[in-house]
Amino acid sequence: MRATAFVSTRPFDLRTAAPFGISRWTHSDFERFVVELRDGDLVGLGEAAPNARYGEDRARDMDLLADLAPDIADLEGPAGVEMFCEGLAAAGVPALRAGLSAAAWDLAGKQAGEPVWRMLGLARPSVRTSYTIAIGAPEEMLAQARAASAFGTLKVKLGFDGDLDLARRLKLELPETTFRYDANEGWDRERAASALAVLEDLGAELVEQPLPAADAEGMAWLKERTLIPLLADEAVLTLGDLDAVGDAYDGIVVKLAKAGGIASAFALISACTELGLRVLIGCMVESSLGIAAALQLAGLADYVDLDGALLLAEDPFTGIGVEGDLLVASEGPGLGVLPVG
Ligand SMILES: [Mg+2]
């Protein structure tokens, strides 16, 4: 990025095609904003998906970015922006950082005429994603799973009364489908232990965040009692969280919106690989703009769950190749994403 880069933000709202429920809440509308970095006619775009679970708020993030705009304009390229983002780590604004990081890489790619994945020294990402069955009425969850026949792997949200009955019915109806599960901190220790026994019988591929993030001791206890890989999501946002809880899990869910951008997610993935921890690259409910940023790194992950844009009633961005459950990153410059219409 050159010293002429100009930063601005634009709010937008995403609506899911169906109400999206997890153990803690159900929503259909999600507040997002686009970070734009402008250099002459070139515009780098990044999506920010602030999450209340991590104390984030769109209005607060956009105000902060407006305050920071003069400093950002002087930064040198994505490396300069990434260092600047690193300096914001203590501010607790990972989604803002992710949006800024993605915009910087998008702009740099457009300036160089290269896709971001190539600038990162990676092969063109071409990966199969799981599709999320969110919490709703059991018949609705079953109908959604049936309708998602293009996906070899479904990720089912658990952590509600009757969740294991639902898991059994899904496996019975779709015996060929691979199932992964996400309790979103929705179980206590005893409940989790009995749930994992059932899910093991069902051939679960993995389970995300069975216990509250703060219960690392409970996780270590639980890990002794199951063969299913247990992945930390809410418990690990960044590299800094890894030391405290790494031992209690078999793997980590890496999201740009938690890690704070492309470079920090890359560093977290590398650290996990070195420690022998598995990596699932995941997302929030995000448009194709946010998903495209995560997709750049998806070839490095053991598991991919980048279905955020596929859950939307309307996607305001386009540029990812989607064929069934196969996601292919664009060969276009930057993130290869364009606004729709
Ligand atoms: Mg999760």
Image (tube, grey):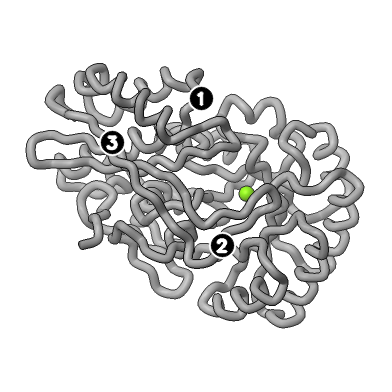
Which residue is at a point 45% across and 33% down the rendered structure image?
Answer: 260
Q: Tag 2: residue type?
A: Pro
Q: Which residue is mark 1?
A: 92
Label 3 sits on a secondary structure element that is strand
Q: Tag 1: residue type?
A: Gly
| Residue 142 left/right relative to 99 | right
Which residue is at a point 28% across and 49% down the rendered structure image?
Answer: 335
Residue 175 at what x, y percent from top left? 71, 80
Q: Which residue is mark 3?
A: 9
Q: Which residue is mark 2?
A: 19
Q: Mark 1 against mark 2, which lies toward the viewer? A: 2
Q: Mark 1 against mark 3, which lies toward the viewer? A: 3
The answer to which quarter of the image holds residue 135 is: bottom right
Q: Tag 3: residue type?
A: Thr
Label 2 sits on a secondary structure element that is strand
The answer to which quarter of the image holds residue 247 is: top right
Residue 67 at what x, y percent from top left? 30, 19
Label 1 sits on a secondary structure element that is loop
* Residue occupying the far bottom of the picture: 173
Which residue is at a point 70% across and 61% down the rendered structure image?
Answer: 205
For disc 2, the neighbor class at 10 Å (few under 14, some 14 to 19, many from 20) is some
Mark 1 close to ligand 1, CB under 8 Å: no
